[in-house]
Structures are given as structure tokens and as C-alpha cells.
Image (cartoon, rainbow, N blue to C red):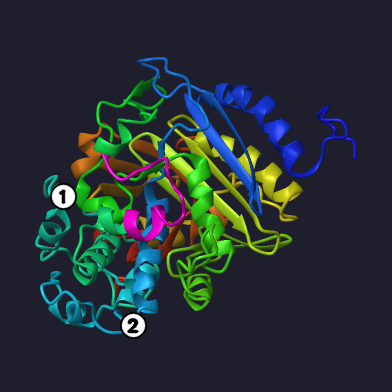
Amino acid sequence: MTKPDGLGEVDGLDGVGVWLRQRLPGLVVESGVPGAAVAVSVGDDVVEAAAGVLSTATGVGATVDSLFQIGSITKVVTATLVMQLVDEGRLDLDAPVREVLPEFRIADERAARQITARQLLCHIAGFEGDVFTDTGKGDDALERYLGVLDGVPQLFEPGGMFSYNNAGYCVLGRIVEVVRGEPFDVCARRHLFAPLGMSHTAGDPYEAIVHRTAVGHVERAPGAPLEASAVWALARSNAPAGSMLAMRPRDLLAFARMHLAGGLGPDGGRVLSAESVRAMRQPHVTQPDIDQGAAWGLGWELFDLSGGTVFGHDGNTIGQSAFLRVVPERGVAVAIVTNGGRSRQVYAEVAGRVLGELGGVGLPAPPVPSPTAPAPDAARSDRYVGTYRSSTSETTVSRDAAGRLWLERTPLGVIAELDEAAYRTELVDWRGDTLIPVEPERGVHAPLAFLGDDGQGHALYLHTGRADRRVSR
């Protein structure tokens, strides 16, 4: 089979490896990404490549053994630890969380009594999810974190809809600690990383420092040059949600291959039951129409793509982004890690090639606004106009004299402290009550949906994957 890009007769996984090593150096430059590493597996066979630098401040080159933070892909690790407890008969997913954590409190006492581990796993518990309070670096960080949730508001009834919830995964991490009687990071190493041979995986900066480790890069203002971040990781209290875990792509694939193998580790030992592996990939909730994935299972995001089903997860932390995609029918997995810049451009080209050539599935084209897309008409615009707030941002949607709709988002709290840039864009029609921004953010036009009703004909939520509640007209 002759390749149009000059790979000649090289085919299959080896051909992808040749292409990766040739293409990745140029791709990171074109994408403004300081450094990236990629691993691809078919069955137990792996090819990998790396390019660029781990930090623009030091110029240290990225290698295939370099550690990058995987951000929220950590949530699937946490979900797997939880499902191990289910396998052992030590946790009932549908029992109230308070049966294990009687101290669990949020602002809505009635909701706190009802919320279950299953609802936390698939992001339908309904309380404010972006709580990044630093409760210290000690082994009691998660225990103390539970104490700061008592004022967190309930956005909707438990089970009412999908809203991505970092805090919920911190609660799940505390469940693992209480049932196991050990700190979360110890549980992860003992019950997952060691059995899977994940030798280049770090649960905190103290472990990461002995490896060749990437630093995130951020824009201090829109369009400004990327700078190496002065902060490497978020607080330990958010570790189960993805604030610290770092690894090389090959180690991330070792975790994915266990799921592909029905829960068996590399030595044939049982790490997770086949029943739990299947349960984690069963759809539990569909997402709003924002083009982010068809559904969510217990930890995994589920994508219904042309040619087959794919599961995976993305991760974003301070200036770093990671992507994991798995095609179960073909035994194919790809892990992509980056440390700044237009990371989705790297993801789109690499994952598009790998999933298409080896997995037989096609990635959809990223959403982009039509040059002729109109602003919503006045009646619909009135439904959308207002201010929406979460603990990490305040978003105002306004209409100008010409009838054009504008979105302005201001970072709040810990996100503002990390010098996250404000964002302003015009919104135009896309699909129904889902609009699309004209100006990209980090190279992406991410659609957003206006959902619900405040009782006066206005949308109650601005949904971007998270449900931000209306706070003013």
C-alpha cells in the first residue's frame, strides 16, 4: 500500500510509527506547542515519538520517557479504583455516599443525603463542581477537602443532567481512602500502577522530579507569547480529579490496555473484573448538544464516531493537555500529551490519522462557525442575555444595538490567580439553542448551550460541559 505522504510500502502500526517520528517535530512548531509525546498501541505492540522541549525556560528536550500531566484523564484512574471496591463487595454504587462518608456535606442537605457514587462517577450529582481549595500537602488533604464543600450550591436535582464535576471525583477519591485505609496516591500505586508496570508515573511533584518532566505553558493575555508556568500543579486536594498525576504516554497506554483486555494486567493477573470493565463503558447520561461526545459512562467519555464506538478522556491542567482514545473493536489506543499551545491541532492530526488508519473510525471535523451564520433573532436572544456564574468564571451574554450577541467571560478564584486570560467573542447560530463562538479559544470554537427556564422565559443554564447557573437578567 503506497502512502500519499511518501511512506512507501510501510503499513500498519510500524507505518504510523514512521509517520509520527517524521511528522511530530513539524506539527508541534505549526501548532505553537512547546513539546509533545505520543504513544500508539495495537494489542501489546507500541510505537512512540516525542518532539519539542519540556520547558522553554530550560530548553530540555522532550523524549518518549518524559512525564506530562494527564489532567482529568486521572478521573478514569479514580473510577477504576472505585470499581475495584465494587468488585470486592466493599462499595454499593447506588447507596448514598453518606453510608461511607457520613461527614459529606453540601449546601443542600436534602441532596447531600441522596447523592450516590454512581451519580458522582457520571457527573450527574448536580452540585457546583469546580472547587479547587488548597487544603495542604499532607495525607489528610482529601479529608480536609470534604470540610470545605458544606457551602457548595446545588445547581439541579441529583440525576437531573450532566455537568462536569471535579469536586465529585475528589469525593470519590476520599471514598477510596476511607475504604482502603490508605492515602489516595498510595492506593493508586498499589492497586493500579504497580500491577500494570507503570514505572514512569508520578502522583506528585516529589515523584515527578526524579524523571524528565514537562512544565505547562500559558498565555498571560490573548495572543501573548507562551510562557513557562510558575506553578507546576494544582492542589493535592484535587488529585483524584486530575491536579497532579503525570506519566509518559506508554504508561497511559498500559492502563488503557488493561481495560481493553477485560481487566487483565500484563502478567495475566486480574486487576478489574470484566463486569466492571463493561459497566464503565455503558452509557449512563447523554451530554447536551455541544459536540463533545455522545455520552458518559462510569469515568469514560463515549464517542459515537463514523465507523465505530470510541471511548476515552481528555485532560487539561496548568498549561498542559492530554488526550486518550481507545477503539475496543480493533484493540487500538492512542495517548497524546502536550505542554501548551494549540494542543487540539496536534490531537486532531495525530488521532485522526491513528483512529482512521488503525481503528477504522473517522473523527468528525471540528465545529466552526459559518461565515454567513446569523445572530439569534431578538426573541431568542432575549432568552440568552444575562449573567451566569460558577466558582471559576463569570460569563455575561449581551446584545448590542445591531442585534449581535456577545459573550464575555472573566476568570474568578484560583483560575484568575493562575493568570487565565479573559475571553470575548461574538455568538452566532449553530444548532437550536446551541450557539458557537466566532473567535476561537486556544484554537477551538467550542459550542455552548442555553438550557432550562428561569420561570420568566430566560435560559437557566449556560452549558459548556459544565452548567453555569443564571445569576442576573
Q: Residue at x 73, y 43 (%)?
A: 13
Q: Residues within 10 Å of mark 1 (few under 14, many from 20)?
A: some
The answer to whether residue 240 is above or below residue 45 is below
Q: Nearer the viewer, residue 22 or 81?
A: 81
Q: Are marks 2 and 1 in contact (CB under 8 Å)?
A: no
The quadrant holding residue 56 is top left
Give x and y (percent) for residue 368. 59, 44
The answer to whether residue 433 is above or below residue 157 is above
Observer-side mark, 2 or 1, equals 2
Give x and y (percent) for residue 402. 45, 42
Give the mark nearest the N terminus, 2 or 1: 2
The answer to whether residue 231 is above or below residue 455 is above
Q: Residue at x 22, y 70 (%)?
A: 154
Q: Which mark is residue 89?
A: 2
Specify the segment rendered in magenta. Answer: 189-205
The answer to whether residue 441 is above or below residue 111 is above
Q: Which mark is residue 133?
A: 1
Local secondary structure at mark 2:
loop
Local secondary structure at mark 1:
loop
The quadrant holding residue 310 is bottom right
Q: Indicate yes or no whether the magenta region holds residue 79.
A: no
Q: Residue at x 32, y 61 (%)?
A: 165
| Residue 21 located left or right of residue 205 | right
In this rendering, does residue 346 appear at all?
yes
Q: Indicate yes or no whether the magenta region holds residue 198.
A: yes
Q: Residues within 10 Å of mark 2 (few under 14, many from 20)?
A: few
The quadrant holding residue 453 is bottom left
